[in-house]
Amino acid sequence: MEFIPGLNVPVVVGGCASYSTALHLMRTGAVGVLVGVGPGRICTTRGVIGIGVPQATAVADAAAARMRHYLETGEYVNVIADGGMRTGGDIAKAVTCGADAVMLGSAFAKAEEAPGRGYSWGMATFHPTLPRGTRIKTTVTGTLEEILVGPARENDGTRNLMGALRTSMATTGYQNIKEFQKAEVVYAPSFHTEGKIEQRSQQVGMG
């Protein structure tokens, strides 16, 4: 509770995956909270130490903590979804669950300009005795500009991420992030199979 107030720069802290932890971190004076334990593409935290929360649940819980903190203090703390953001659809769903922003790792590692040159790895990978992740090879899919704002030449959702977010907002009738955070969310367990028969058989798109 003393470290952050003693600094002269805005501080973002994390990661967390529960209401109580998010609220505690917000009360330390952080301007942003990173949310997510275990959902990342290269993370094995859930398997190695048994800790992790589904990202949608974690973001929603942190957003609820943000509202309580705001009502108590008048200070708005940004919720940043950290992990599991692979497509524009993932980003859109994170925002509707309450995220103000998202952390992108593997998505940027696929850019031609990425310093990893087609490889990605996380902080937990380097633990000397209990690594929770690994260095993985990713396919370079385009420039950073193409990944962020297009044009997308494939329909797998991994390029033109901002265009996908804007289209999702427009389709559901919301004009900005604050409004979009109030969108109704429905759980659909058959997302990866529903309506994808031909794509799967031909191994194209999201198949």
Image: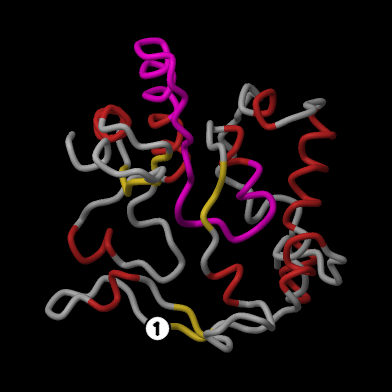
Residue visible at 29% across and 50% down in the picture:
52
Please identify the quadrant where the C terminus is shown: bottom right
Outermost residue, bottom side? 117
Q: Amino acid at mark 1?
A: Arg
Q: Nearer the viewer, residue 173 or 54?
A: 173
**Vertical relation: 14 (above or below) 85:** above
Residue farthest to the left, as pictured = 129
Q: Quadrant of residue 100?
A: top right
Q: Nearer the viewer, residue 87 or 175?
A: 175
Q: Which residue is mark 1?
A: 135
Label 1 crowd bin: few (<14), some (14–19), many (20+), radius 10 Å: few
Above or below 177: residue 150: below
Q: Position of residue 63 (x, y in %)?
A: 45, 28
Q: Which residue extends farthest top?
A: 71
Residue lying farthest to the front in this orientation: 8
Q: Quadrant of the N terminus?
A: top left
Q: Residue 48 location, x and y as percent? A: 21, 66
Residue drawn at x 25%, y 34% as measured from the top left: 21
